[in-house]
Amino acid sequence: SRTAAVIPAAGRGVRLGPGAPKALRALSGTPMLIHAVRAMAASRAVSLVVVVAPPDGAAEVKTLLADHALPERTDFVVVPGGATRQESVKLGLDALPADVGIVLVHDAARPLVPVDTVDGVIEAVRDGAPAVVPALPVADTVKEVEPGAPGEPEPVVATPERARLRAVQTPQGFDRATLVRAHGAAVVGEGATDDAGLVERLGEPVVLVPGHEEAFKVTRPLDLVLAEAVLARRRA
Ligand code: C5P
């Protein structure tokens, strides 16, 4: 069976500052989404990439893909997204053909993930794990808070032991049937920030494999500086 990658790219990217939808912003002259699409297609195992575009931006994204060089052995499909990441991923899953057995879900906002990380995730799913997540240890100590009024100091509730925490990345890899079941059981608006979390709610096992520093999420303006620096280093 085939392996497909779903790329949710329908976010507005408000934390990055004013401008175009995040996925369409340029990194060293090329839209972030194109970098992310190439990162998935770089894996020999990935034969289909489904891009979930902003709800009103599917035509624009189709044009964008047509205007950039992409591997010929990979198929590309564009579908319109939804109001939340979770809805966008669901719409991407709905577009998968029947012969897809393994699904990667990859944030357009992680344009620089190395192919070895992608292949490591796929391999772990092939080896039998229904849900696989690339992850790294956290550098910062993380506090749980009781969110208060904006601008007010926030009371700390707990400090989880840092050595037991991991920051998770994408692509997250899944046995297709498990991921479809997880999204089917998910409640819209319950605020799942990753797909593996939905699989956890089913009670199915989720395992971590090593992530990569270059798989960081471009979220705030400083992340753009880092992304440009990584690309410059790759060109050197
Ligand atoms: O907002 P956040 O950084 O968590 O977004 C992660 C990914 O989900 C991004 O690639 C973004 O484009 C995507 N997303 C989406 N549909 C939404 C919101 C976010 O596809 N409605």
Image (tube, rainbow, N blue to C red):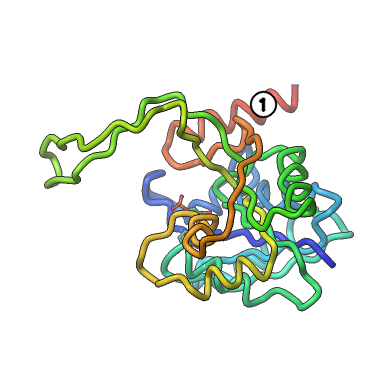
Q: How many labels does the image show?
A: 1
User: Where in the figure is residue 9, as x and y percent of width and height?
Assistant: 55, 59
User: Where in the figure is residue 186, as x and y percent of width and height?
Assistant: 45, 70
Identify which residue, 76 or 185, lies in the foreground: 185
Which image quadrant for residue 142? top left
Q: How crowded is mark 1: few (under 14 residues within 10 Å), some or many (20 or more)?
A: few
Q: Name the residue under label 1.
A: 232
For the C terminus, which image quadrant? top right
Q: Which amino acid does label 1 sit on?
A: Ala
Q: In this view, does 146 lie above or below 49?
A: above
Residue lying furthest right: 73
User: Where in the figure is residue 8, as x and y percent of width and height?
Assistant: 56, 60
Q: Is residue 232 above or below residue 15?
A: above
State the residue at coordinates (80%, 66%).
75
Identify which residue, 22 or 203, lies in the foreground: 203
Identify which residue, 214 or 54, lies in the foreground: 214
For the N terminus, which image quadrant? bottom right
Q: In this view, does 224 lie above or below 11?
A: above
Q: Is residue 40 left or right of residue 109?
A: right
User: Where in the figure is residue 175, as x and y percent of width and height?
Assistant: 69, 62
State the residue at coordinates (43%, 51%).
13
State the residue at coordinates (51%, 65%).
202
